[in-house]
């Protein structure tokens, strides 16, 4: 059977499957369904310096082949996460990635400083697609200069590798990816959700109280594949691909596009066992397409054969 | 919790746009009154949370209203076909030692109260049931509650069946005291019950994604401060607990 092991900065993944941040909480709910140690890693829910109540409901709307969410980074704050969530995760043999969020650059640095001495955290994932930031309301993740700057500050503060999760709501994803690579990012995670909206025909008003929300699910997979494909050819740091994965074939598509590992998001809501199922099926899917190793599949879409 | 391809035993219309589906499933052995199941409807992305109406050996009964395209597809499903279930999810209504319990249901909030009625009647509790609907064509399960030995009172908004008005009007008309109440129904009804009930529980409805407490999609604010997840911490909450 094909070995699924993947080595990335700070992360020794027994397989390339990682539940995506915000779609898996801190693992407790899914631990009731299967052994979390089966997973390559877990990207835990965003941490901010302080408690955040999140957005008013409704926060969820279904879409064709996907969903919109406007949770608004609800979390109890980094101190509570350290005290109440990390000890539970320490019971499992899987690599924990802390998703770091904030309303300004200082927030990211503060969260990282607090998590640095938590051995259970193996790497950081900067969530720089938050729309409520200081700089004129532009998300840190949509401006190469701002994205690079926050990356640099986080790298200086961090004692563990820093991955940057990029927003797809940009004209040129490659420009942003190169900017954060140059600023010292150890890896990239792409993509975050696409900004979307639904309107309730009964009221004529947006269905989500936040008006707009992030689109995820199979609907966004082609966008994610395209962005991974473009960025993989332009940078020399590893990419964790994410966006609309539902099965092992989807994982192979992301590997072919240039991802070294993947995150599985919204599908956990539809099929709570999806990550376990993908891990079980991935070796036979790789074999079916003639691969002798996982590494052979990575970036095949643009490599000379 | 279990995910299962379960067999539909029956799926029939019982009121205007309201359907009752009986499903053969091992989920029944884990289920409690007030819990819900998450149903995967072919062609639609997110699962539909539907409350459990009745729990029998190897069988769960659900009652749902056709409100959108997903439930429309469900209404076309036939006996013998399979349906993808996950659950049971959430907290249920606790069955306590009480002399009298008042069950207050509005519209498709009625179904989860049926299993409560059954279990309370099994304990010989005096069960009063007040059911609210829009119109006579929407009314269901009056006979079923009566057959359990409950005292049943009905209100309709247009007065075409029972007392004209809301269930609050029915309570007043029949001089029923809301001492210990289990309620499920539309938000205005729950607010009214929450305000007048001495004790009891309300079951909330919400737009959900994960259904197991991971995504924070369906939260409500608590009176004491902080947030709770309808899918995991609820859908059943103590009266007075949630900012409705």
Image (tube, coloured by chain):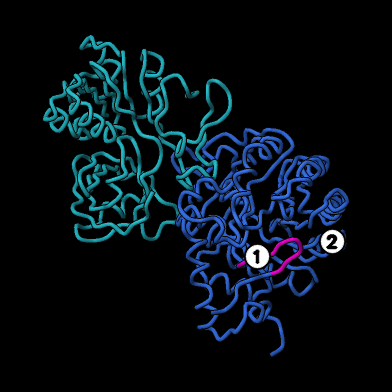
Chain colours: A blue, B cyan
Residue B34, percent across and down? 33, 35
First in sequence: mark 1 vs mark 2 = 1
Mark sitting on residue A13: 1
Q: Chain of mark 2?
A: A
- In percent of the image, x 84 and y 51: which residue is there? A146
Tell how many labels.
2
Residue A206, percent across and down? 54, 41
Q: Observer-nearest residue: A253 or B66?
A: A253
Q: Chain of mark 1?
A: A
Residue A8, percent across and down? 73, 66
Occupied quadrant, residue A263: bottom right
* Element on which disc 1 rests: strand
Q: Are marks 1 and 2 in contact (CB under 8 Å)?
A: no
Occupied quadrant, residue A168: bottom right
Q: Is residue A295 left or right of residue B5?
A: right
- In percent of the image, x 15 and y 33: which residue is there? B144
Q: Observer-nearest residue: B89 or B123?
A: B123
Q: Observer-nearest residue: B17 or B158?
A: B17
Mark sitting on residue A179: 2
Position of residue B168 relative to residue A255, above or below, is above
Query: Which dot, 1 or 2, sits closer to the camera?
Result: 1
Main SS class of the magenta portion in the image: strand
For the record, the magenta segment spans: A7-14
Position of residue B12 relative to residue A181, above or below, is above
Residue positioned most to the bottom: A305
- In percent of the image, x 18 and y 28: which residue is there? B122
Occupied quadrant, residue A115: top right
């Amino acid at each position: 059977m094909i070995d699924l092991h993947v080595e990335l900065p700070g992360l020794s993944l027994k397989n390339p499957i990682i539940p995506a941040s915000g779609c898996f909480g801190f693992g407790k709910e899914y631990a009731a369904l299967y052994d979390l140690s089966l997973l390559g890693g877990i990207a835990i829910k965003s941490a901010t310096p302080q408690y955040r109540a999140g957005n008013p409901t409704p926060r969820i709307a279904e879409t064709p082949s996907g969903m919109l969410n406007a949770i608004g980074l609800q979390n109890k704050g980094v101190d509570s996460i350290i005290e109440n969530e990390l000890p539970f995760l320490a019971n499992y043999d899987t690599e924990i990635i802390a998703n770091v969020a904030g309303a300004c650059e200082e927030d990211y640095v503060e969260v990282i400083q607090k998590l640095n001495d938590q051995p259970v955290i193996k790497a950081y994932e900067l969530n720089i697609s938050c729309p409520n930031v200081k700089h004129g309301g532009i998300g840190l993740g949509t401006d190469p200069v701002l994205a690079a700057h926050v990356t640099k500050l986080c790298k200086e503060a961090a004692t563990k590798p820093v991955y940057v999760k990029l927003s797809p709501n940009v004209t040129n994803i490659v420009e942003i990816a190169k900017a954060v690579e140059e600023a010292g990012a150890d890896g990239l995670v792409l993509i975050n959700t696409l900004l979307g909206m639904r309107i309730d025909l009964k009221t004529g008003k947006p269905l989500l109280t936040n008006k707009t929300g992030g689109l995820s699910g199979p609907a966004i997979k082609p966008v994610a594949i395209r962005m991974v494909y473009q960025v993989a050819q332009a940078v020399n740091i590893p990419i964790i691909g994410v966006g609309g994965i539902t099965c092992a074939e989807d994982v192979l598509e992301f590997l072919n596009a240039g991802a070294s590992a993947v995150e599985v998001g919204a599908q956990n809501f539809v099929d709570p066992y999806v990550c376990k199922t993908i891990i079980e099926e991935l070796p036979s899917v790789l074999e079916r397409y003639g691969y002798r190793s996982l590494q052979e599949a990575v970036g095949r879409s643009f490599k000379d054969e | 919790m279990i995910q299962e391809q379960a067999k539909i035993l029956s799926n029939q219309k019982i009121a205007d746009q309201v359907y009752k589906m009986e499903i053969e499933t091992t989920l029944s052995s884990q289920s409690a009154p007030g819990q819900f199941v998450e149903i995967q409807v072919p062609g639609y992305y997110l699962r539909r949370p539907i409350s459990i109406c009745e729990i029998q050996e190897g069988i769960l009964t659900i009652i749902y209203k056709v409100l959108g395209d997903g439930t429309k597809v469900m209404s076309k499903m036939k006996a013998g076909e399979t349906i993808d279930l996950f659950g049971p999810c959430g907290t249920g209504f606790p069955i306590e030692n009480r002399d009298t319990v008042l069950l207050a249901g509005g519209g498709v909030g009625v179904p989860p109260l049926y299993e409560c009625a059954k279990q309370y009647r099994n304990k010989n509790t005096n069960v009063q049931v007040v059911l609210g609907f829009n119109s006579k064509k929407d009314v269901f399960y009056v006979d079923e509650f009566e057959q359990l030995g409950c005292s049943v009172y009905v209100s309709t908004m247009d007065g075409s069946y029972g007392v004209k008005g809301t269930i609050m009007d029915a309570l007043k008309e029949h001089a029923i005291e809301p001492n210990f109440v289990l309620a499920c129904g539309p938000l205005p009804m729950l607010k009214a019950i929450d305000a007048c009930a001495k004790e009891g529980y309300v079951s909330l409805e919400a737009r959900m994604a994960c259904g197991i407490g991971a995504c924070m999609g369906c939260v409500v604010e608590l009176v004491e401060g902080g947030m709770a997840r309808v899918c995991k911490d609820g859908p059943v909450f103590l009266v007075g607990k949630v900012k409705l």
